[in-house]
Amino acid sequence: MKVKEILEITKGELIIGNLEDESNKFSRDTRTIKLGDTYIGIKGENFNGNLLWREAFENGAKIVILEECDYSKEDLQVFNNKNIILVKSTMQAILDLAEYKRKNMSNQFTLVGITGSVGKTSTKDIVANVVSQKFNTLKTQGNLNGEIGLPFTLFNLENQEAAVIELGMNQMGAISKLSKVAKPSIALITNIGTSHIGNLGSRENILKAKLEILDGMEQKILIINNDNDLLHKFYLENSDENIKIYTYGIENQSDIMAQNIMRTEEESKFICNIDGENVKIKVPVGGIHFVYNALASIMVGKILGLNNTQIKHGIESFELTKKRMDITKLENGVTIINDSYNASLESMQASLKYLKDLKCERKIAVLGDMLELGKFAQELHQKVGKEVSENKIDILICSGEYSKYIIEEAKRSGMKEEQIYYFNTKDEIEQKIKNIWKSEDAILFKASNGMKFFEIAESLIKEERGMTV
């Protein structure tokens, strides 16, 4: 984009610069700016990127887009070969620029939009790997799926033929806004659970919020997990001829299904009938939820015209984004399961079931708070406690205000006092683990990202391997 295009798209004001100068790439981090980049200053609760525009120029930026700028006459002289653009809102500017970028992709370009209460990132990883077997594919890095992350993902669109993009939300209207920017060709909803129920009030409202992914679509092609109760109900009751629904599942009759499932700690195998051929599929990660992710990718691949060999290879060669079921076997014989990026009742249930099925000496669950649950926090943490007991976890270690309800219900459901520990700090948890762990133990770390339990897992791994923490 040229400066004059940016001004037109953002309705911005050029303080200094050249209308014909071109933007190479967009960045919001002055530390990673490259020569010729455009820096966008984002203002957050605790940080104001608008104040770092001089640093951006000094590090090589050609253009800065800001909503406030404390420039002087001397600044304009020093940076007279640069461009300063003022806009009303940089948050709105990045959405407008990303939408422009998306609109200018070719008609043959396909964007798969993925949302859901849990499993967005792992589903994105496997779907993108399948799609990339046929198309040059862009995917969301990490979990950059919100009002900032999604636009900056779309800024990386160049000559790709497809993209697999996450759409996240924590309130009504958020996904609608993102969908109108990303304009999905295919929408995929992994499930409807309890994440953000504190903001939205009910699972039914969460379903409504997730269905906003359809708002930016011209032709509404929707893929759903047909075993999820609310999505299955939506499928049965939906008669809108403008929405073409495809289904995948294990229990309810679906377009794509897994049969003869065989699971081990490290992988799952199943047979799937794809266009009349029974294809043997191996998923290189354990856990039944990854079978569902694989089924979703098969459905996407089938819609996009991939052959069965391409679909099979895409599933069997995919790699997970780190911190999501990141499994490390240490030299002392302990297995660390770092699944600490996010947490909801549904993802807690899945992780605890995975831990239960492991062949190990002792099963240790290190669990923290699930956030953004509002008035449902006590009830849902108690349900986790019941899951801990029912999955026969040997040792429970907790930290956090709401995790006390996990302990409370675990005891009520049959766990003994000597099996349970509570600590106020991550350092105390780490020390306790080092005092009690034994060869062949398996330790699960699971909590909302704000609890930063991944720091405990990473510290234990580094220390055991003799690395500097």
Image (cartoon, rainbow, N blue to C red):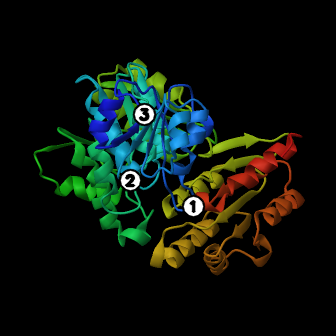
- The reply to whether residue 224 is in sight is no
Q: Is residue 241 left or right of residue 411?
A: left
Residue kind at label 1, given as amino acid type: Asn
Residue kind at label 3, given as amino acid type: Val
Please state, as top left, top right, bottom left or bottom right, where the N terminus lies in the image: top left
Q: Nearer the viewer, residue 447 or 296?
A: 447
User: What label sits on residue 127 in the rendered view?
Assistant: 3
Q: Is residue 438 left or right of residue 378?
A: right
Along the polypeptide, which appears first: circle 1 or circle 3? 1
**Circles 3 and 2: CB distance less than 8 Å?**
no
Q: Nearer the viewer, residue 433 or 184?
A: 184
In x, y percent, where is residue 306? 34, 21
Q: Label 1 to label 3, Cα distance in Å? A: 35 Å
Residue kind at label 2, given as amino acid type: Asn
Mark 1 against mark 3, which lies toward the viewer?
A: 1
Residue ID for mark 2: 191
Residue at 22% across, 52% down: 235
Q: Residues within 10 Å of mark 2 (few under 14, many from 20)?
A: many
- The reply to whether residue 37 is in sight is yes
In what element is the residue under mark 1?
Answer: loop
In x, y percent, where is residue 349? 54, 60
In what element is the residue under mark 2?
Answer: loop
